[in-house]
Image (cartoon, grey):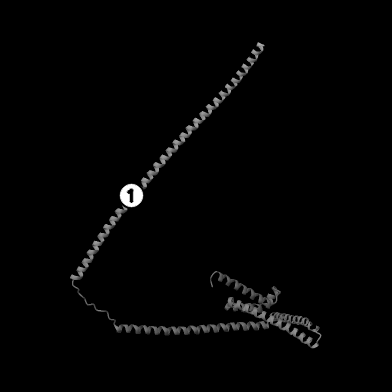
Amino acid sequence: MNDLRSSKQDERMEEMLEMLESMEKELTQKDSIIQQKDSEIRTLQGQLNESLNLCEKLNSENKAENVQALKNELKQTKELLQSEKEKKKRADSTIEECQDKLRQAEWEKEYALTHQKKVEIPVEKPVLYERCRNCDRRAYQQAKERYEHQRNGLEKKYKAKIVGFDAMLVVLWWYAIVTTIFAAIRSETFLSDFTAFVDTVWNGICQSGKWIVNVGNALAQVGDRIPNDTMAIVVHWLLLIIVIVGAAVAVGVLIVIVEKKVTMVYRENCWDVISVGVAVTSVALVVYFGDWIKGFVKLNLVVLLLLVQAVYVGIRVYVNGCKRARGYY
């Protein structure tokens, strides 16, 4: 029994020793951890102290710099005030000197006015010489009369020459037109083309008139449906007359509008001697050389003349438009 008890006590002692050893190991580990933490705390405290010292130094330096800057500004302000005071003193002294000079000048002026003698010197006024003035006037009038007389004579001569030139030009154009008309009457080719052109135009007018009459009759048949014979006849002829008169008025208005447009284009762009020369020359060429032209161009000579005139007008309109756009007109 004693052996058992001693063995149990030994086992408990061993367990106690093992627990002590484990606790010692834990204590040593905790001591090492505590030491590490203490070292870290010391390093952090040292860094904190360094940063605080650095902040204090920076604050002290900034304060010193601010104080120095303020001192410099105060010094500059004092210097500016001192310089302004000196300038003001110099200006005041200059003003006093000027006032003294002005007072001296006024005193000298008063003395001169009160103590000096006044001497009046008679001056003769210039008098115009009336005779020479009249002579110059008469010479001017005589020169003006001679100028007017010569001018009137030259104007009369110029007008006479202009009238003679215009008369000669009219005679020449009249001769050219008359000879061209006579040559056209004698030219079989031109006369046949002219007759064909007139016949074509007349046939076109007649066909248009017949078509208008047919349209009027077709519309007038609406009145034939009226039961009353008298009213039917009246409505029939009234519709026919309205259609014919309306068509004639429309054609007449269209002709007037086209004539005004063509006349306006001619007046703005082709109202000169060049256009007359082009027209007469083209007619003369067609009349005298109509046979040769018909050999090259199978076209009615009158239609060819109208085409040439249209091309000429188009060219003149384009040229004048370009000149207006560039500022010549």
> Foreground residue, 263 or 94?
94
141 shown above or below 298: below
> What's under tag 1, amino acid-wise?
Lys
In-image side of 144 versus 268 (left or right): left
Q: Quadrant of residue 152?
A: bottom left
In-image side of 301 versus 82 (left or right): right
Q: Which residue is mark 1?
A: 78
Task: Residue 285: give x, y in percent of width and height.
Answer: 64, 77
**Which residue lies at the image location 42% right of the left edge and 84% below the top edge?**
148
Disc 1 secondary structure class: helix
**Which residue lies at the image location 30% right of the left edge and 56% below the top edge?**
88
**Which residue lies at the image location 19% right of the left edge and 70% below the top edge?**
114
Task: Residue 189: give x, y in percent of width and height.
Answer: 70, 79
Mark 1: few/some/many CA within 10 Å (<14, 14-19, 20+): few
Residue occupying the far bottom of the picture:
230
Task: Residue 254: give x, y in percent of width and height.
Answer: 67, 79
Q: Quadrant of residue 196?
A: bottom right
> Foreground residue, 95 or 190?
95
80 shown above or below 178: above
- Figure quadrant of the N terminus: top right
- Figure quadrant of the C terminus: bottom right
Residue occupying the far top of the picture:
2
For the image, the number of numbered tags is 1
Residue occupying the far right of the picture:
227
Q: Quadrant of residue 179?
A: bottom right
> Foreground residue, 248 or 312?
248
Task: Residue 72: give x, y in percent of width and height.
Answer: 36, 46
